[in-house]
Image: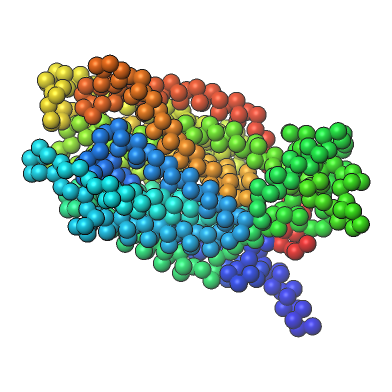
Amino acid sequence: MEDNQKGKQLNREATGDGTLDLFGRPAVKCKTGGWFTSSLILGTQGFAAVGYFGVCTNLILYLTRVLHEGNAVAANNVSNWIGTSYVTSLIGGFLGDAYLGRFWTAAVFLVIYLLGMVLLTLTATVKAFKPPACTRNQSFCPKTSPEKTTLLYVALYIIALGYGGHQPCLTSLGADQFDKEDPKEQTEATRFFSWYYMSITFGAITAGVLFVYVEDNIGWGVGFGLSTAAAVAAVVAFFIGAPRYRQQRTGGNPFTRVAQVFNAALHKHHVKVPSDSSLLYEVDFKGSAIQGSRKILHSDEFRYLDKAATEIDSDTVAGTSEKNPWRLCTITQVEEVKCILRILPIWASSILFSTLYTQMSTLFVEQGATMNTHVAGFKIPPASLSTFTMISVLLSAPTYEYVVVPLGRKITGNKRGLTSLQRMGVGLIVVTVAMIFAALVEIFRLKSARAHGLIDAAKPVPMSVFWQIPQYFLVGASEVFTYIGQLDFFYEESPDAIRSLSVALSPTSFALGNYVSSLLVTCVMELTSKGARLGWIPNNLNRGHLDYYFWLLSAISILNLAFYLACAIWYKFIQIDRHDDAAREEP
């Protein structure tokens, strides 16, 4: 009797969305989750970002100055590496949702990330692994051996696997710390995404100001060592909160559920879907048949897939009363597939945004390296100007929360001010303006080089690198609208059981954007460097036309914006069955 009373008391104190603690028990509100654990997750991501951006921000200069790669080759290698750093998030998202859970998946990939950082530091500090240095007057730079080059890239791609793999699980785990069935906590979950992105920004600023300076003026080994120390801090901060994290149940392989829906629909292609959606199949107990996921209300899009939830006699396994999951699926399972299909076009349109965004780490830096970087006797590393992107984020994020949101509420009546789709659309417009400004800066830079006879001179043009500030600042503002909007959109618009995998779409779009950037640079150089022509992006930018490339990106972005608007107008938001509160209960 006493045990039963304790059990009932525990259920009353437990979260309403079915989260568990580290030991698999129902998560008790007063002992788990909330801002305590989410703050540790923010700290973890902040330290991880410090380490990652300590490498990423200046990597193109390391490849050109230390590994002696050409500008176009180095830009492509950086783009490919950054892309891999984010596409691996799909691996982490899948494992976190399907098998390991978000906590343990994030833990494993954080350790992998740390090991990669250690190896990278060794390649820059141990003489046997370091690339050979150029002569004092830079007249001769020995070629780096294939073995040393391979070791460097192995270290970089281990970092890419670890950093990308932990991100979607860490993001979703942070949002899971707030009960989705508690309106007050749900409001806090929405704010979490802004703080999460702010933690990344703080990390990037620290790396852009301190670590880049150390790498340029003290040594690459010391700079990479600081990045490794930040990775250690990230792992420690993460495990401190282990006993108090709220964790979602794993839902099993989502690709199997998707395959079941398509198989059932195709098998019953001849079956007529009832006009009354209440006649479609759904389990009659509280909660859905997908572990850890709440029921989803029926929607009218993709009606063909409703055939999978249309019950016929042959759906029952012969000799039993059980339903064959490859012949009959619940409404929630079908709606899970519909959610994926609705999200994908929005995701596709975000890829080209990332293509424009990645110019900040590649061609913006190369453009700045040809300009005057001296201010009051100090030499500013060109990559450090990315700090202004981060400052823009720090200024734009609170401006959005405290100015745009209240104003938007008055105009639209939406409690969020702007919907996540409207927010992302504004970001697409802002990043296009950034590319236009970059093209204008390049036009004036080339004019300055010609006017001062510096076309072939090995010194910068007398034009301050601070002319780049507006383009960096606009890219930062676009981040606040697009990337934070993406995190919110992909988390809120996905079923509970695939949230990590859905959140992984955001970094994956960033990854593919980097690959598209690399492909675009290759195609542009191939088409513009025929015969005696050097192309738009030669090693000597004074002989090229980087401005043409930025104009091309602007035109592509305008076309992408038109595609996005069409997708956003068509999109229908997910509808969770709020009357069914039993995701907390086992079937």
Quadrant into which the N terminus falls: bottom right
At x 76%, y 83%, the residue is 2
Quarter of the image with the C terminus in it: bottom right
> Which residue is the extreme one toward the left?
137
Can residue 43 be seen at all in this image of the molecule?
Answer: no
Q: How is the image coloured?
A: rainbow
> In front here: 510 or 578?
510
- Which residue is at the front of the view, 376 or 291? 291
Q: Nearer the viewer, residue 460 or 479?
A: 460
Q: Quadrant of residue 276?
A: top right
The answer to which image quadrant residue 340 occupies is top right
**Residue 320: in sight, yes or no?**
yes
Q: Position of residue 439 (x, y in %)?
A: 32, 23
Q: Position of residue 256 (x, y in %)?
A: 69, 49
Residue that lies at the very extreme toward the front in this rendered image: 146
Q: Position of residue 382 (x, y in %)?
A: 24, 39
Q: Residue at x 69, y 45 (%)?
A: 258
On screen, residue 390 versus residue 401, left or right, reads left
Query: Of 549 and 315, which appears nearest the observer?
Result: 315
Residue positioned 60% across, 68% down in the render: 21
**Percent coordinates x, y for residue 564 in the rendering:** 55, 28
Relative to 483, 462 lies left or right: left
Q: Is residue 29 left or right of residue 214?
A: right
